[in-house]
Every structure is written in structure tokens, then in C-alpha cells.
Amino acid sequence: MKKSLRFVVPLVLLVLAVFLWRATHPALSDEQQIEVALDGIATQASHKSAGGVASFLAKDFQFDGFKRSDVRQQLAVGLLQYSAVNMKVSSVQVQVNGDTATTRGHYDLGLKRDFNSPEDKVPSDFSLKWKREDGQWKIYNADGNTLPPGLTGG
């Protein structure tokens, strides 16, 4: 009897803790989830992680003839050219329509060839189309956008 209590009591406390945490931390809205994803993209770009950026793209991502793997490859080559990358996203507008969404906003990209060089500023607006894929919001199209100058690897 004592052995089963040693197992049951911590299990009950764990379940109660999960319920309490969940009650005090409600799920994010779709708009908030997309904003978090945009922040994640900026963070991954700042960490020079082409794979991290590509992880926010849908499996069937397309834009301007590029597929997800093409974008990842171009970013990987482009990011290697810089010692430091700093990306900030602002003025985000999110419009959700069921399992699809669109976002518009602005990003400021700071690029440094060496740590001692001045930062080249690349400001741009963006427009993205999203869909829910495997329970997460992923970008499936970026019509009217281009890869940020300097990160195209060309």
C-alpha cells in the first residue's frame, strides 16, 4: 500500500500542477501564434540559421519560382557572408480566415561583413500567406516579396 502511495501522490500533484499552469496560461490566439512565429523567424535569421528560418515555411512553400529547399539553400549561402545578422520585425498586421491567414509588416535587417565593420541597414516591407499545417502556422506563399538583398547567395 505504501509503495503505491509513493507513486500516486506525486502523480496527482503533477496533474494538479499541470491543470493550474494551464488555467493561468491560456492558449495563444491564432494572431498571437503567427506573431510568435514571425519573432521566431527574426531570431533564427539573427542566429544565422537558414534551417531555422526554413522551419517556418510550409512543405509546399512557393514564391517567385522558389521552393522551401531553394530558399533554405540561398539563405545558407547568403548568411555565411556575414559575421553578424540582426533582424527586427515591426508594424505587423495579421488577418486570420479559418485555417489561412495573411500578414503584412516591416522588417529591418542589419548585416555586418566583419565584427568591426559598420552595420548595413536593409529595411523592407513584407506580405506573407500562412496556413495551418500539422497544428502550426506555416508560410506557404510570399507573393510580391524577394529574398532580402545580400542574403540571396548570388
Image (cartoon, grey):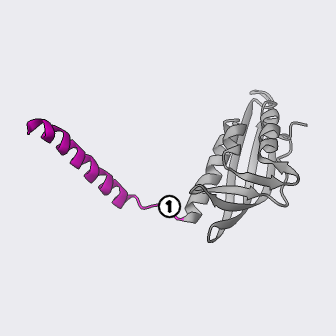
Q: What quarter of the picture does the C terminus occupy?
A: top right
* Residue 47 image point, x, y percent: 66, 36
In this view, the residue farthest toward the left is 1
| Image height of 1 relative to 114, above or below | below
Residue 31 rendering spot, x and y as whole percentages: 59, 64
Task: Tell me how many marks there are.
Answer: 1
Q: Quadrant of residue 110?
A: top right
Task: Find the magenta span and give its range.
Answer: 1-29
The furthest residue to the right: 154
The residue that appears at 75% across and 53% down in the rendered structure is: 60
| Residue located at (9% from left, 37% from top) | 2
- Figure quadrant of residue 77: top right
Q: Is residue 119 among the parts visible in the rendering?
A: no
Q: Is residue 19 visible?
A: yes
Residue 102, percent across and down? Answer: 70, 66
Relative vertical location of residue 117 with respect to residue 60 in this rendering, above or below? above
Q: Please tell me whether residue 13 is drawn above or below residue 84 in the rendered image.
A: below
The image shows residue 100 at horizontal and vertical percentages of 66, 66
Q: Is residue 73 magenta?
A: no
